[in-house]
Image: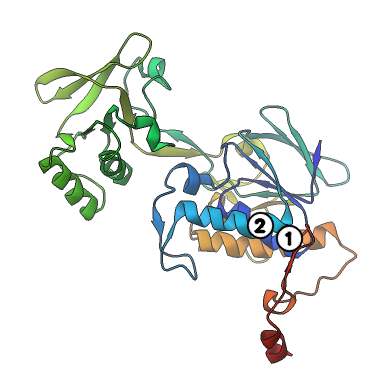
Amino acid sequence: MIKTDILIIGAGPTGLFTVFEAGLLKLKCHLIDALTQPGGQCAEIYPKKPIYDIPGFPEVLAGSLVDNLMEQIKPFEPGFTLGERADSIEKLEDGTFIVTTNKGTKHHAPVVAIAGGLGSFEPRKPPIPNIRDFEDKGVAYMIKDPEVYRNKDVVIAGGGDSALDWSIFLADVASKVTLIHRRNEFRGALDSVEKVKELKDLGKINLITPAEVIGVGGKGTLELLTIQQGEETLDIKTDAFIPLFGLSPKLGPIANWGLEIEKNAIKVDNTLDYQTNVPGIYAIGDVNTYPGKLKLILCGFHEATLMCQSAYARIHPDKRYVMKYTTVGGVEGFDGSKKEAPKAVVKAID
């Protein structure tokens, strides 16, 4: 049994920042995430994508933001249960909770903070009857490590930013890149579309439009694709097929926890602390909904801050917390380290 003060479900940016805010209150956190690494979508789907609306960062790569958050929370020594999905929750007589994962790992906490982003993601798969036979055998629905495709023949299908951006990136990694889209027009950023066309003219990307992949084949591993282009059907050899048709968010088992759900999001009280209809369970970040909700990382940071104040009062009803600005009190970690506030700043505030 893993015991903690705040159990955070979801290790994306909002979940990670919750650790920092809780740490300032001397509250211990443990995070559960179905992904095998912290960072949520930022680390898993678009680590190389720039983000422009994080305060203090005119531009920051999604992966770098995650790295910075991990560095920021290091003094507070959070625990992680990664590669496991939060499956069930039980409320005990004393008001605390036990959350069990799909692998049977049990967690006990007086406060549960659901920071699961848009939920668990499932790729939108092309309607090819036997495509499952080649999953992880040449067929993948997202790119985790581009080096896997070094010097390989790669076919990407899709018309959005991911398909365009990865085609551009892999043009310098793979031996051959083919981009297939069912329309002549793309939905992605104009500069990416122009870059793809430029690489096509240079012979670095093979562009096939309008067309779609209708079949996959091979002996054990993927060897060829069947493509429909107008009236013509053709087979092409390949080492890898990556259909990038987007991801469908689903709340998963959390939807069965007795929480009030509205349009695949968890309703919360935003007038105070982002608590759900179940006392002690909060929802912060993109997973929640309330009047005027904006699905932005910076909004998740704000929600996490207020949630932690409420969690402190719930865990320590007999104590009164006096908030201190970090510019005055510094940051003291559980490991004994402390970042002191500059004396000049303290004096000015005094």
Crowd around label 2: few <14 · some 14–19 · many ≥20 (10 Å)? some
182 or 146: which is nearer to us? Answer: 146
Mark 2 or mark 1, which has the lower sequence index?
1
Cα distance in 3D space between marks 2 and 1: 8 Å
Q: How many marks?
A: 2
Mark 2: secondary structure: helix
Q: Is residue 273 above or below residue 139?
A: below
Percent position of residue 286, x then y: 53, 52
Left or right: where 159 falls relative to 80: left
Percent position of residue 53, x then y: 44, 65
Q: Which residue is mark 1?
A: 23
Q: Is residue 244 above or below residue 13?
A: above
Q: Which residue is mark 2?
A: 73
Going 57% across and 41% down the picture, which residue do you hit? Answer: 37
* Type of amino acid under label 2: Ile
Using the rendered view, name the quadrant where residue 338 is placed: bottom right
Going 56% across and 59% down the picture, which residue do you hit? Answer: 300
Left or right: where 297 falls relative to 222: right
Quarter of the image for the C terminus: give it. bottom right
Instruction: Please identify the residue farthest to the top as the structure is shown.
Output: 219
* Type of amino acid under label 1: Gly
Percent position of residue 263, x then y: 50, 46
Using the rendered view, name the quadrant where residue 142 is placed: top left
| Residue 279 in view (yes/no) | no
Instruction: Please identify the residue farthest to the right as the structure is shown.
Output: 318
Percent position of residue 304, x then y: 64, 60
Crowd around label 1: few <14 · some 14–19 · many ≥20 (10 Å)? many
Mark 1: secondary structure: helix
Query: Is the C-beta separation of discs 2 and 1 under 8 Å?
Result: yes
Going 46% across and 33% down the picture, which residue do you hit? Answer: 122
Q: Is residue 219 above or below residue 34?
A: above
102 or 77: which is nearer to us? Answer: 77
